[in-house]
């Protein structure tokens, strides 16, 4: 039996969605973020030494890192015939999105979130405008242009493709869902990016996605 | 023929090292960072729309994302017999490090670098202590503990393994080399982490690594 060690409002929601699409039985073990630090609780360390989510267990195997979990599920429980042969263009595209979501896109979204917190965290009144100035300058000169670059790239890709790998839903879509949902929810993706918004809305209406949402519990990004 | 689109002081250095270990012929196309912004030049967009490095071309194929490039080279030019079967523990370990380096470890190192820049960037004298306060607080409360968590994990792993996947050098080592070299070079990994330091020194002495360094040109992290 697959166990998903599930942290609320986290990257593990996409694992539940994938398992629902695969119609694979699984159980959820729930973990709650610390209400002050928003970090995962230490109890997750019993599953994996880093104490992060998502992580799944399947029999004797413990699997961490979203991209690896999704790839593992695709190889173990997915339609093997649709998996690309190593070294082909399809294989490159498949692996590209699995790595890109967390390796290239998420770091800038996370940095944006941290600098938003810099602006709003408690501090003496005279420090506030300076904190805002620092956050705005970093956003304008570095983080903002990087996020724009990435969103332009994704918007163009989704203008030509229904799903990340073309006509059919695949592992790449589960992996890309988290950063795109977060971007829509935080207003980073606005009406000027209709392809991304349409894409997210399209999959959020799927029955499997809805079932995952119900089982995962309250989810701030959806 | 493989072409490595190589940006100075970047994650593409590890691709050169891997190609040298594979004894695979390749050519280097060089790109220089903008001396002011430290970003890659726009000319890289002709190779891949994001305009990032590393990216390689191999015949008709264009491959981006370090983890995908390294995995592609291992599957195409490496010892196929040593590649793990999908879904096995070895396969999970192999893929874990390929994803972990950029998906989990690098974002915190990048954030640390950005907050270091916050402290040292030009600003009015009265703003300096506030900028330092913000950077130090973020470092102490969030980034620092995250980096410590990751380095503890890696230090323990390298106390039990010569290479990331055990007794032999593998794709995982090329991928993990960039964040670890950067951490040693920036003093994030100190003498209290002897296993990481020994590991980095060990591979930096390899003939293939030295050849890659010579061909790649000046490299600030080594």
Image (cartoon, coloured by chain):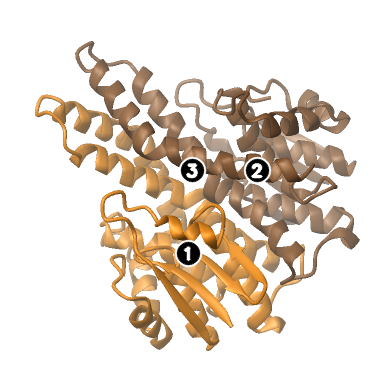
Chain colours: A brown, B orange
Residue A50 appears in the figure: no
User: Which residue matches tag 3?
Assistant: A107
Q: CA distance from mark 3 to mark 2?
A: 21 Å
Say left or right for A216 vs B54.
Answer: right
Q: Dot 1 falls on which chain?
A: B
Residue sitting at 76 percent across and 49 percent down? A171
- Measured as percent of width and height from the top left, residue B103 is found at 54, 50
Residue sitting at 11 percent across and 24 percent down? B126
Please check whether the numbered discs 2 and 1 fall on a single chain.
no
Residue A217: name its quadrant: top right
Q: Nearer the viewer, mark 2 or mark 1?
A: 2
Say left or right for B136 vs A163.
Answer: left
Q: Dot 2 falls on which chain?
A: A
Which sits in the foreground, B9 or A216?
A: B9
> Label 1's element?
helix
Which sits in the foreground, B78 or B191?
A: B78
Instruction: Return the mark for residue A156.
Output: 2
Q: Nearer the viewer, mark 3 or mark 2?
A: 2
User: Which residue matches tag 1?
Assistant: B176
Local packing at callout 3 (Cα closer than 10 Å; few below 14, some 14-19, many 20+) is many
> Label 2's element?
helix
Say left or right for B56 vs A80.
Answer: left
- Position of A40 relative to B217 (above/below): above
Local packing at callout 1 (Cα closer than 10 Å; few below 14, some 14-19, many 20+) is many
């Amino acid at each position: 039996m697959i166990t998903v060690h599930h942290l609320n409002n986290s990257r593990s929601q996409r694992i539940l969605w994938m398992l629902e699409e695969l119609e694979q039985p699984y159980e959820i073990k729930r973990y709650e973020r610390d209400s002050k630090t928003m970090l995962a609780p230490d109890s997750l360390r019993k599953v994996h030494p880093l104490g992060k989510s998502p992580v799944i267990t399947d029999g004797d195997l413990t699997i961490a890192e979203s991209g690896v979990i999704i790839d593992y599920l695709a190889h173990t429980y997915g339609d093997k015939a649709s998996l690309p042969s190593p070294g082909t263009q399809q294989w490159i595209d498949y692996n590209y999105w699995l790595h890109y979501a967390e390796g290239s896109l998420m770091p800038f979204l996370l940095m944006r979130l941290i600098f938003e917190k810099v602006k709003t965290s408690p501090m003496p009144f005279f420090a506030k405008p300076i904190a805002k100035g620092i956050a705005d300058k970093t956003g304008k000169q570095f983080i903002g242009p990087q996020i724009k670059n990435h969103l332009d790239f994704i918007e163009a890709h989704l203008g030509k493709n229904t799903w990340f790998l073309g006509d059919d839903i695949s592992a790449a879509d589960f992996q890309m869902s988290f950063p795109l949902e977060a971007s829509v929810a935080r207003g980073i993706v606005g009406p000027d990016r209709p392809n991304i918004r349409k894409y997210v809305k399209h999959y959020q209406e799927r029955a499997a996605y809805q079932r995952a949402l119900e089982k995962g519990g309250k989810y701030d990004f959806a």
